[in-house]
Amino acid sequence: MTTVVKIGGARAVDPDGALADVASLVEDGEDVVLTHGGSTAVDETLAELGEEPTYVETPGGVVGRFTDERTMDVFKMVMPGKLNTDLVESLHNEGVDAVGLSGTDGKLLCGKRKSAVRVKEDGKKKIKRGDHSGTIESVNADLLETTLAGGYTPVVSVPMLGEEKSGGYTAVNADADRAAAAIAGALEADLVVLTDVSGIYEDPDDESTKIDSATTPEEFAAVTDAAEGFMTKKVMAAEEALEGGAASVTVATANADDPISSALAGAGTTLEPGVLEPDEDEGTAQEAAE
């Protein structure tokens, strides 16, 4: 079984334990695909250049980055340039034959570019144009499987390859959690999302209310209701991963000893495929068979 690991890009996330754990898993013969975020580093680089990041709220209430052309240039420098290279370097120092890949390499991550997005400003719905982002619709699983079969550990970063309406491609931003979800689904892998909290809490301010697992739609509804802020996107990504074919999704802290192994052993909040609502057609067919 392959494990896809996503290391968050928040300042409070320390990747060292996860990288050492990747090395241990690989040494034991496990296949690992590492993915990573980096929004904090992008924002810091923009600030150093005297520019402000732009965040927008969708009509559904989800806050995300608006990526204009200038921000996209910084994004390409920071994500596949610095952060991905740093992680590959660190894994080599852990004895892992790591290979850095961006979503544009070999059409690893592809989908339609969104040149405009719907946003909510001052209570009004608007269209904001000039966006350089996209939604991942396909994953080149063969590229990852070939890399793994050769004894290498892929380290994957967005951007993705955005398909233009007029034809051709443009490198565009994509959410790192959703990228990890798409990869896990394509590989039918376990997904471990490492962040700066130990899981999903019923009360976001109380770690003792951590939800250990969800295996039914009803339990997943409770998880969805509990998720707030940045955790909302992670729960959305978890659902997409399971819908795509992932074996399980665990949200756990990166700041622990052996965080990946611990998450796979039950630490954090684990979501199983049973949380998905049954397909209506499948249910009808099953009832007919009975």
Image (cartoon, helix red, strand yellow):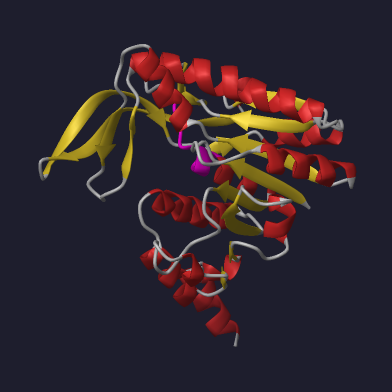
Question: Residue 19: x and y, percent?
Answer: 72, 38
Q: At x 58% / y 42%, what residue is drawn?
A: 180
Name of the residue lying farthest toward the bottom:
290
* Outermost residue toward the right in this view: 28
Q: Which residues are magenta?
A: 173-179
The question of residue 176 being in magenta is answered with yes
Is 184 positioned to the left or the right of 197 in the image? right
Q: Whole-percent x and y of residue 192?
A: 63, 51
The image position of residue 159, as x and y in percent, is 51, 25
Q: Is residue 48 left or right of residue 80?
A: left
Q: Position of residue 22 (x, y in %)?
A: 76, 42
Q: Between residues 144 and 5, which one lies in front from this camera angle?
A: 5
What residue lies at 73% left-to-right and 22% top-to-bottom?
Answer: 89
In the picture, the quarter occupied by the C terminus is: bottom right
Residue 163 seen by the camera: no
Picture quarter containing residue 134? top left
In the image, is residue 225 above or below residue 134? below
Residue 127, visible in the rendered structure: yes
Residue in the image at 53% along x and 28% along y: 158
28 vs 19, nearest the viewer: 19
Q: Judge by depth and name the residue closer to the eye, 110 or 25.
A: 25
Above or below: residue 265 compared with residue 138: below
How many labels were placed on the picture? 0
Q: Is residue 201 inside the magenta stretch? A: no
